[in-house]
Image: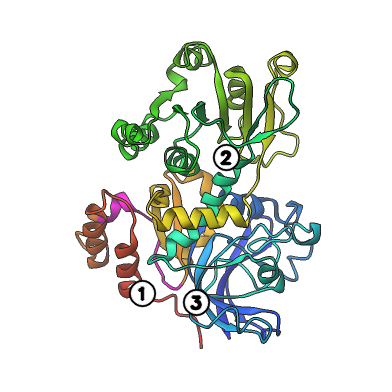
Amino acid sequence: MHTTAVRLHGEKDLRLDRFELPEIAPDEILVKIISDSICMSSYKAASLGSRHKRVPDDIAEHPVIIGHEFAGEIVAAGDLWQDQYPVGMRYAIQPALNYQGSMDSPGYSFRYCGGAATYCILPHQVMELGCLLPYEGDAYFLASLAEPMSCIIGAYHASFHTQAGSYVHQMGIKPGGRLAILAGAGPMGLGAVDFALHGNIVPSQLVVTDINNERLARAASLFTPEVAARAGVELLFANTAEMADAAQGLLDLTAGAGFDDVLVFAPVASVCELADKILGHDGCLNFFAGPTDTAFTAGLNYYNVHYNATHVIGTTGGNTDDMKESLELSAAGRINPAVMVTHVGGLDCAAETTLNLPKIPGGKKLVYTGISMPLTAIDDFARLGQSDPLFAGLAQICARQGGLWNAQAERYLLQHAPSIETPA
């Protein structure tokens, strides 16, 4: 079977290729991909090429398919999996395999497995580790976004606290504690706000910072005081660039006690150092945003580490249980990953979008792999709809959902957008 896929051939060398997939082995599964959301991690892999820890050395000769936040339907299963994974089953993928200590992962390491494709082949590792998950929801994009949400959920679960005289780590953010999300008005930050308000452990106070008033205004419109109040949370937004002393200003919001948990969503030294300064006793700093600079450093107050029991952790990706939790919360309507999405496009925009991701404003960029469409902001649908009936229809549907991407918009797009025209 032919597939159309975005493949990494070298540093900053992404190409939209059409090629033949091999026949699947008895321990492999052939899948159709419907949706794939673009992650900053894919930008990092594309920028570094084989210097990235997950990317093979021989991509010039054997390019790999990028994309790891994907969902779709099973087309064919090898003999080993036919009883467990029926044809037509909708699925989501947990790409953080950690198979026998290897860092190989879909979207980084495999010639025939990645999300930026019309079809791909899942290697045996995915099924052996239980990372191919059935999905029964009505929107493929929510299954795609379950992966980034699982990373957020994993960060919350990885945070920990202690009690004086005890060496036992109590896992998770502090129940009823004070939580700050720094650089938190971007797409992943919005997902983190959603989970803080609607997950199984909620803080009593949540402060979200950014340095961009437009991003903060959008966040505040999505998560209103009424939404936070229903969760029993005091929610505050702050632009640290407008504070004379950001650390003191944030500490004042806690009446000087400091924060029990601080999540850092930008790999910027000044943001990391601000997080360190606002920790309270036994405060946990979670460095969520991975840097591309292998020599990235930031200052840390070791006096507080010693006497105030502050500590630093870092998480990269979630596990399968986090993915299941994400899917369950989304299906139950407790979280809405659509808050992360600001742009939608077809497979033919994926390469350029990935390579320029840090320069493109807004939140998550969602790709539907079977269609041809330029990357388009949801906010631009109405304007474009004046001359294009496709966007006119999408604008009307999204307007009814408060400007958010949704299941009806997905169905409309898949029905009316032009095909990417995979050759027979």
Q: Is label 2 in a helix, a strand or a loop?
A: helix
The magenta-colored residue range is 370-381
**Crowd band around label 1 with a 10 angstrom C-alpha radius: few (<14), some (14–19), many (20+):** some
Mark 2: few, some, or many residues within 10 Å (few <14, many ≥20)? many
Between 119 and 148, the residue placed more toward the observer is: 148
Residue, disc 2 = 156
Residue name at image x 24 percent, y 59 percent: 397
**Of the image marks 2 and 3, the number of the one nearer the N terminus:** 3
Q: Check disc 1 and report the residue beneath it.
A: 418
Q: Alpha-carbon distance for marks 2 and 3?
A: 30 Å
The type of residue carrying mark 1 is Pro
The quarter of the picture where the N terminus appears is bottom right
Q: Position of residue 384 (x, y in %)?
A: 26, 57
Q: Report helix, strand or loop for mark 1.
A: loop
| Residue on which the image places disc 3 | 89
Decide if residue 1 is on the left or right side of residue 331.
Answer: right
The mark that comes first in sequence, 1 or 2, is: 2
Toward which corner of the image does residue 276 lie, by quadrant? top right
Give the CA separation, mark 1 to mark 2: 40 Å
Please name the amino acid that badge 3 sits on.
Met
Q: Where 55 sits versus 210, above or below?
A: below
Residue at 61% in and 38% down = 288
Q: Position of residue 245 (x, y in %)?
A: 50, 12
Q: CA distance from mark 3 to mark 1?
A: 25 Å
Residue 263 seen in the current view: yes
Membership of 216 in magenta stretch: no
List x then y, in percent, for residue 272: 62, 26
